Amino acid sequence: MKKDYSISWFQIGCQAALMLLLAATGTFAQQANVNLDWNPQKNTEKLNPYGGNVISPEVADDHTIIFRVKAPDAQKVELTGGPILLALKTKGPIPFVKGADSTWTLKVGPVKPSIYVYRLLIDGVPVADPNNTFTGTSNQPGYSNVIVHDNGPAYYDAKNVPHGNITRHIYNSKVLNGEREMYVYTPPGYDPKKKYPVLYLMGGSGELASGWMFDGRANFIADNLLAEGKIVPMIIAMPNNQVIHRSDPKHLEKTYVLFEEELRKHIVPYVDQAYSTIQDRKSRAISGLSMGGRHTEAVGFNALDLFSSFGILSAGDLDPEKLNPAFFNDPKIKDKVDYLLVGLGSGELDFVGKRSETTHKALEKHGIKHDYYIGGDGAHDWGTWRMLLHDKLLPNLWQNTPSKTK
């Protein structure tokens, strides 16, 4: 028997009237996660994510988190991931409890408001949370983000302020023999008739050029600081500084040479041609996290004709004077550096702490003015790098130089 799937105009009218009534009485709530919410995982509507079968993670106002996963055949489910375990003050994976409906559940916290990377261990295999829509985008195995909100938008959230734009550029590299990508942020009200300083901001090993936009939220941080009058309007170029496979046995000896060539022949010329930039060294800065910090030191310090400001985030070298002899032996080096940050998180002192400290001491020995900063609650993670960008790097660039753009 053929079924009748038709709907009468009377039914449609009734449904429309019902929706209007619900909306008028305030009970027809907006679907979750349709805006750039600052508390997207609070989930007051208790709606499963599209394509998911449980809500995970669910973040409460008291900063506790509930993780869930439906895995009927699993023997063990655990929570892992350096940033979330550090926030919970534990080193080992935390076990879930299996319910009668085969849903594994774990409640943790409270933790301080931030964005934490985590994975699930399902029978020993690390995987991204299959129900979490906030997943990392990078050149490494998948991971998930849990966004623990406070009582309002954080410094890295989209606020009701003027916003800049980010453009994705694709260009051909003769150095690396292929198509490359670069993201460029222009501040709100960008005017091609004006000239702007440029910050070249790089990621670490396993990051993509989009890392500072998606995980780092560099554009929102810049927008918010500009609205507060705390930084100079600037262009932020976010190139891909992955120039050789990270697992290549000769990665270290090749990467600096290749990246410097890419920087000089393609990245800087491309930005100067595409945007209204101040084309002098005092109006350019270079910074990066982890491997990007190493590139800043190994390549940037050797490119004083291009840059006068530097940000070494969660990085350093155990023999800086050997790495950059020309930099440290330059008798005029003190006058060539406008701003230099060596910064790291309080939770990574046993990871890159010695490298950062040795770089700091070498700079100190040669009387090179710099900002050495250890802070925040994070380790070698985006919580640290967002904090350093917001608290230290952006507010200190071009504050006392002629290139300051009104």
Image (spheres, grey):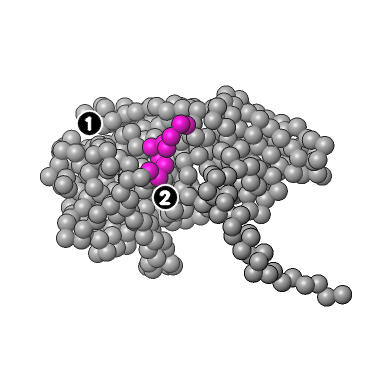
Magenta extent: 150-159
Residue occupying the point 32% across, 62% down: 266
Residue occupying the point 63% across, 59% down: 15
Whether the magenta-drawn stretch holds residue 397 is answered as no
- Three-letter residue code for mark 1: Lys
Residue at the extreme bottom of the image, as rendered: 2
Could you say where residue 86 lies in the image, as x and y percent from the top left? 55, 28
Could you say where residue 194 lies in the image, as x and y percent from the top left? 17, 56
Residue at the extreme top of the image, as rendered: 89
Q: Is residue 47 visible?
A: yes
Residue 332: quadrant of the picture: top left
Could you say where residue 347 lies in the image, as x and y percent from the top left? 48, 27
Residue occupying the point 43% across, 34% down: 152
Q: Residues within 10 Å of mark 2 (few under 14, many from 20)?
A: some
Residue occupying the point 61% across, 46% down: 132
- Three-letter residue code for mark 2: Met
Q: Nearer the viewer, residue 18 or 91?
A: 18
Vertical placement of residue 273 versus 95, above or below: below
Q: Residues within 10 Å of mark 1 (few under 14, many from 20)?
A: some
Q: Is residue 89 left or right of residue 402?
A: right
Q: Is residue 304 visible?
A: no
Sequence-wise first label, 2 or 1 = 2
Whether the magenta-drawn stretch holds residue 151 is answered as yes
Vertical placement of residue 9 versus 239, above or below: below
Q: Nearer the viewer, mark 2 or mark 1?
A: 2
Question: In 3D space, how far apart are the residues under numbered discs 2 and 1 (Cα atoms)?
Answer: 30 Å
Q: Which residue is mark 1?
A: 369
Residue at the extreme left of the image, as rendered: 402
Label 2: which secondary element: helix
